[in-house]
Image (tube, rainbow, N blue to C red):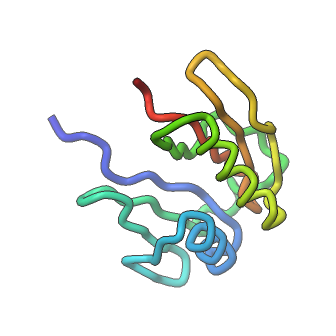
Amino acid sequence: MPAPNLFLVYVRDVDAATTFYSTLFDIEPVFVSPYYVAFEVAPGVEFAVWAGRSDHATPGTPRTSEIGLTVPGHASEVDEIFSRWSATGVEIVEKPHDDVYGRTFVIADPDGNLIRVAPVDA
């Protein structure tokens, strides 16, 4: 059976979102159009931003999903990413804390999409 290979988030401004995610994750787009930009995050797997449904990208709308970045190593790796990202002025939703799965924090992109950093599951 096929596995999901495209992860899409709604944004209001595709250019601003492209800059945000390119800078945050240090990646470049593999496809660019006026309302849709895709990044290859693993062979055959893409993360994309789409402004075609920007009415869904209101920052005040409660979010029920998250973009996840799992990192190997110790809790200090999560704290290091938090320090680096918070220095850029990102919106902090949850400061670093220990949870049942390890050290974690959450930020939001300019459209309110949540981004969680956590350790790789052991």
Residue that lies at the very extreme toward the top in this rendered image = 100
Question: Residue 59, relative to residue 66: is it above or below?
Answer: below
Question: Residue 120, relative to residue 112: is it above or below?
Answer: above
Picture residue at 46% right of the left edge, 77% below the top: 28
**Residue 42 found in image quarter:** bottom left
The quarter of the picture where the N terminus appears is top left
Question: Residue 22, relative to residue 122: is it above or below?
Answer: below
- Nearest the viewer among 98 and 8 is 98
The quarter of the picture where the C terminus appears is top left
Question: Residue 42, relative to residue 20: is it above or below?
Answer: above
Q: Position of residue 84 (x, y in %)?
A: 71, 60
Picture residue at 61% right of the left edge, 61% below the top: 53
Q: Position of residue 52 (x, y in %)?
A: 57, 68
**Residue 21 found in image quarter:** bottom right
Picture residue at 74% right of the left edge, 48% below the top: 107
Q: Is residue 46 left or right of residue 105?
A: left
Q: Is residue 112 left or right of residue 34?
A: right
Picture residue at 68% right of the left edge, 53% below the top: 56
Residue that lies at the very extreme toward the left in this rendered image = 1
Q: Position of residue 91 (x, y in %)?
A: 82, 54
Q: Is residue 14 left or right of residue 59?
A: left
